Amino acid sequence: MDERGAGTPWHELEGVTAGQERVPGLLRGLLIPGLRGSSWAQLEELFGWRSDEPLFVEIAGRLFELLPQLDRHRRALVLGLLARRAEGIGERRVGVHRHTFLAFAARAHLVVPLVSDRSAEVRTGAAWVLRGLRQEDPAALDALRRQAAVERDSTALVSQLLAVGVLSGPGDRPAAAEWARAWLDQRDPLVRLASARVVLTAAPGGAQGAGRRVAGVFAEIGTGRLPEVPWSEGYKSVDRYAVQVAAHPREGEALVEGLARHRDPALRAQAVRAAGLQLRSWRRPAAHLWETVAAGLEDEPEVADEALVALAGCGSAAAPYADRIVRAVERPVGPGWRGSHAALGALVRFEDPRALPLYLRRFGDSQDVGPLPVRWAPELLPVFRERLAMGPGARGTDEVLRILAPWGPAAAPAVPELADLLDTRSARPAAEALGRIGPAASAAAGALAALARGETSPWRFGVGTERSPKPWQGAQTAAWAHWRVTGDPELALWVGGAAARAGLGRPVLRYLADLGPLAAPYADSVRALLDCPGEWIRVGAAEAWWRITGDPAPAVAALLPELAPLAEHRVTELTLRTVRALGAIGPPAAAALPALRAVAAGPPRRYGASLLMDEELLRDAREAVDRIGGR
């Protein structure tokens, strides 16, 4: 190359439509000795991180095109910068990031030859860039595999292994996992770690030995931060491996066994975390995994924290450990806030009576421990009413409103305090709670009607500040609550019907569903939402359509696609709502039986990220199968 950059036409460098005159000169400076260092420093700062801006896209494209002409050091710097910016771009291919992805993807072929560059730094950066783009390019994969087979630099080899693991599509992963085994026993621990990550992409049962190798690496290097180049993952890297290993029961057990007795409490904590993930992933885990987690309750505070969090995510299966959980919380040097919060949530879910005084001691600490048992209402309502009377700004008021709504009529003693909140920024959750209480809250009917009709709106920031000139967003909630407390549907139909006619994004469909056949005049408006883009709206519209009209076919057609995540053992709140809706429809939803039976059979692998959600799904699926008539 000509050291003065004569190999690159100046008009190409001058053609940057950047809106900043410095850019062409800085790009030119990368090719001129004496200016390379200062030009790079200024260009890197100018480039920034706003990948949705035209300047970013323009500079990135020019940097890709200059790669073949840069000196070795500058080439490595440019690849490192592009690699950091490429992180995640491959996953954001739409919207404002689409132009950036297209600019990177169109020039990825310029990077592939650099996988075998003479410089180890360049080889590292090239594989890192390709990994960030996440394009399934056979040429790139072939180049990475060929270079890995002869690579002598450990950092470059790590980058190549990680890239192959990311770029291998689902059909190629078994072959990639088998290919990566060659490095599981390599001398460098980070190479072994990168190799294990690829091996763990194999199907369950195909990752033999990876768990033991991962445990050995972290026992050797600790839990600190992995080198930024090319891992770029920050701290707690062992967490990522614990998640990956969870799909492989035997490897998970090996990882736990390799770390559980380590002298470093941080590694013992990770062993407990890995054991908890195994317990939440498989229906019949090894018994010693439970004991590993339980033993962590008596370990150092950071280990006890992880043990409490693990048990809190194990649902009713962790109930036999309630006594040990209580002892862990009451130790002189007890767990931190995270562990204590998890312990309280677990005891609440067990409905353990010892949770009630523990909850009262910590009431108002911005903790959401889930719904509280309604049988605790007599003890809690005096405290809750006192807090509600302090107004929406009082610590714990929002928490109380979330708890009272599911209690329904049992929350009736709090009606005066809830009614007072209708003129505050907490009006909407207060109206929801009043509606759930029902006729016992009829004293609030007048205030609810005024809010529903738009005759008034709550104070925006506090009593005596100002009221919004715009229509209040909680009018449908107030109208629905008015119907619930008075039994008169006229106002709810008027407000809810107007919202339904307004179309997508306007109606609160669960309120129309509650109205059932009374909302028949607005059925056509609901029907139009069954085909809308948003899955939550489609499911809500399906429920409303069925409950309003009794016509199952359109509702079932809209609901069935939302069962698709179950085939991959994934479950969300929307999936649970869909299963319940299909069960409510009954025999006409027979098309859902194959998917629901597969869940109800209780396969070895659990669904979702938590045992709690798996338990809920299993219960709902079995009930749905019974109601549809599939047994």
Image (cartoon, rainbow, N blue to C red):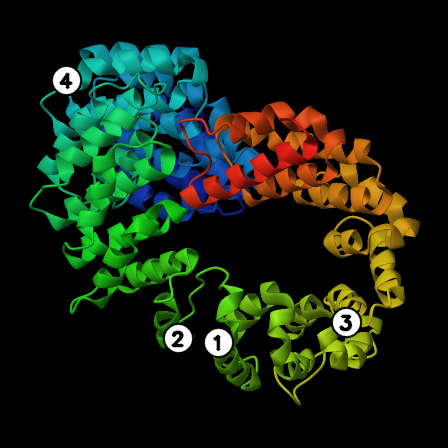
429 on left or right of 81: right
Residue 437: x and y in percent read: 68, 70
- Residue beneath the point at 80% across and 31% down: 553
The type of residue carrying mark 1 is: Leu
Q: Residue furthest left?
A: 263
Instruction: Determine if residue 82 is in view.
Output: no
Identity, as a three-letter code, of the amino acid under mark 3: Val
Of 144 and 470, nearer the camera is 470
Residues at circles 4 and 3 in contact by the CB criterion of under 8 Å: no
Local SS, label 4? loop
Residue that appears at 39% across and 59% down: 345
Amino acid residing under circle 4: Arg
Count of numbered badges drawn on the protein? 4
Q: State which tag comes first along the sequence, 1 or 4.
A: 4
Label 2 Cα crowd, 10 Å radius (few <14 / some 14-19 / many 20+): few
Q: Find residue 485 and name its label.
A: 3
Q: Mark 1 — residue?
A: 380
Q: CA distance from mark 4 to mark 3?
A: 76 Å
Label 4: which residue?
152
Relative side of 427 to 253, left or right: right
Q: CA distance from mark 2 to mark 1?
A: 8 Å
